[in-house]
Image (tube, grey):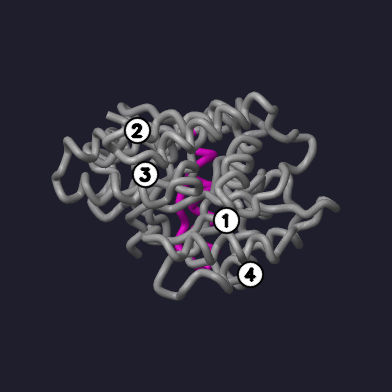
Amino acid sequence: MNISGVFPPIPTPFDDHDQLDRAALRFNVERWMRTPLAGIVVLGSNGESALVDEDESRAAIETTREAVPSDRLLIAGTGRESTRATIRASKEAAKAGADVVLVRTPSFFKSEMTHDVFVRHYRAVADASPVPVLLYNFQRVTGVNLAPATVAELAQHPNIVGIKESGGDMAQVSDLVSLTPSDFQVLVGAAPTLYTSLCVGATGGIVAAACVIPELCVKIYDLTRAGHHAEALAMQRQIVPIARAVTTGFGVPGLKAALNLSGYRAGLPRPPLQPASSGALETLRQQLAALAQPAASRA
């Protein structure tokens, strides 16, 4: 399965009663699908997946599938702490219309998460999943690292087709590319390193910035693949401020705020997360306004 390209890891909108807002979700996805994005990632970290109930997860996948054309991919996050629960979630996601499942590392028992444990976990999930599995490594959030050597072993499984690597460590991205088979796909989860990652062999990105500025992120991908490196690098530099703001800067609340400012219906984060501060909102407004200026005025 080809999962190259740029994908937005979309937020999950909640209404004023803290319920899944399916109408807002459908509105957002339909808008994203009018851009050149390769598909949609639902219920990733930016989708507040850790705060979403199982019945909401299925509803979110079903609603997203309704708005994603069959010729574009729907990737659904199904990582859970137990192997059993991850398998169940992956099967449910497939029934709801997911083309691929994105499986984060279990992490509660951090000291027990060894190479052998990860290999057994992911092989069991891949054996049982009706759709291909995309590994998901996000050490900043989980506190555990899926090492390149472990990924290389897992890449031999026919139903494990790639990895989302969100660490931003270019040495690790390079190792993932060099240690795995040529058909194993490495996607990065950090927009500030999108251009560099593509240069060392990554096949795409699942980046929060693509939710807010999808055309620019896809343009970086297209320019890099076409060998127009000076233009791609210039555009990469332009997106770094907003890319950092909606991830390490202001987190999920910042991403939702940026989307609301851009005309999407992202709503508020689910407690215990709190809305973005007034200072964050002003910073985001300025960054979005700067990106909206003609290139000549930015020079």
**Residue type at the position of mark 3:** Glu
Q: Amino acid at mark 1?
A: Val
In the displayed structure image, the side of residue 191 where residue 104 appears, left or right: right
Q: Residue at x 36, y 46 (%)?
A: 217
Amino acid type of the residue that numbered disc 4 sits on in the rendered structure? Glu
- Residue 187 is left or right of residue 199, and the answer is right
Of the two numbered discs 2 and 1 in the rendering, the one whose residue sits closer to the viewer: 2
Q: Position of residue 275 (x, y in %)?
A: 72, 35
| Residue nearer the viewer, 254 or 42 | 254
How far apart are labels 2 and 1 at the CA level?
26 Å
**First in sequence: mark 2 or mark 4?**
4
Boundaries of the magenta span: 115-135
Q: In the rendered image, which residue does mark 3 sit on?
A: 153
The amino acid pointed to by label 2 is Gln
- SS under mark 2: helix
Does 74 appear above or below 246?
A: below
Residue count near mark 1 (Cα–Cα under 10 Å), binned few <14, some 14–19, many ≥20: many
Q: Position of residue 188 (x, y in %)?
A: 39, 41
Q: Earlier in the sequence, mark 1 or mark 4?
A: 1
